[in-house]
Image (cartoon, rainbow, N blue to C red):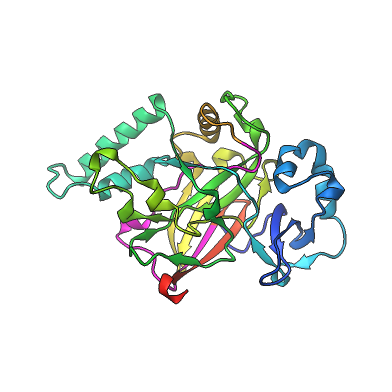
Amino acid sequence: MPLDHDVLPAFAIVRFRRGEGAPAEPGVLADGRVHPLDLAAVGAVSLNDVFARWAEVEADVRAVGGFEGGFALDAVVLTAPVEPRQVLQTGANYRTHVIDLDLAHRPKDDPRSEEQARAEIAKIMDDRAANGEPYFFIGLPQTVVGDDQDLVLPSYSDRQDWELELAAIIGRPAFRVSRAEALDHVWGWTIVNDITTRDRVFRRDMPAIGTDWYRAKNAPGFNPCGPFAVPASDAPAPEAFALRLDLNGETMQDATTEDLLFDVPALVSAASQTLPLLPGDLLFTGSPAGNGQARGIFLKPGDRMAGSITGLGTQQVTCVAEEDR
């Protein structure tokens, strides 16, 4: 994909620190500079309130970016641009990714050729897209951090994997909304990297119980987020995002949201049927093909990931060993 890791959004909501150890505060990115956002001055009590009341406060928030001054990006520390109360994650939602993972888990004595297996899995995916439902699980909000934090690789496994994802930021509360009205409840978008400990996904001691997403995906810092939150009006249409993740300068994931099995309206609507989605919540949309599991490689200390999505900028995450912390 022709994604440039150096391209910044023209406008975004951020959270930033004026130095290491300083408290995080809300801000506006405009023309490459960060401007502090006085929430009280725009009639809001929190960033989640800004997302909820965007139609009322948008003009005043955007005006903040029109003032002279502000900070250069290299003069501040950006952190996660959102503080979600709920994190909903979508599993197995990119057609090619699911096919690749199924092939990676194929038994060694499978009598089918790789081509036969791929064709059969593809048929299952197409049927699921036509007749099935999205698959969700819940993440812990405290795993959402900024790319200002190194990714600490837990010492209990050497199979930590990357999963670059587009995340929808909820604006208006959504409860049992239809697919047709779902996008009206999406404020905008941000980048997440849903880190996964692959050898903790399945419980070997209880195979019948299936996946264990708590242990596999909720270690500290396992959801690097941001650094920018971009309104939907300033970003591509949901079906037009390109995603690219580079590991140490080599492209691993390179796809578009056209490969989604269930699109964003379907995800928001389906998720809202069970749980009321709240302003500032994150709904992950799934990760495309190109993960370490399918390649037989995993994250190690010193690795550096650069994840970009069209119009949303880039996050840079450095991996460190737990014992080095």
User: In this image, 244 relative to 51: left or right?
Assistant: left
Q: Identify whether 312 is placed above or below 131.
A: below
Q: Identify whether 150 is placed above or below 109.
A: below
- From this viewpoint, which residue is outermost toward the front? 205
**Magenta stretch contains residue 281:** yes
Question: Nearest the camera: 294 or 277?
Answer: 277
Count every numbered label the image shows and give the total.
0
Q: Residue at x 17, y 47 (%)?
A: 107
Q: State the image coordinates of residue 218 (x, y, percent, origin top left).
A: 45, 53
Q: Residue at x 33, y 49 (%)?
A: 201
User: In this image, 144 relative to 156: left or right?
Assistant: right
Q: Is residue 267 visible?
A: yes
Boundaries of the magenta span = 278-307
Prevailing secondary structure of the magenta residues: loop
Question: Nearest the camera: 174 or 304?
Answer: 174
**Magenta stretch contains residue 216:** no
Question: Nearest the camera: 81 or 12?
Answer: 81
User: In this image, 201 relative to 259: left or right?
Assistant: left
Q: Residue at x 62, y 32 (%)?
A: 183
Q: Is residue 289 visible?
A: no
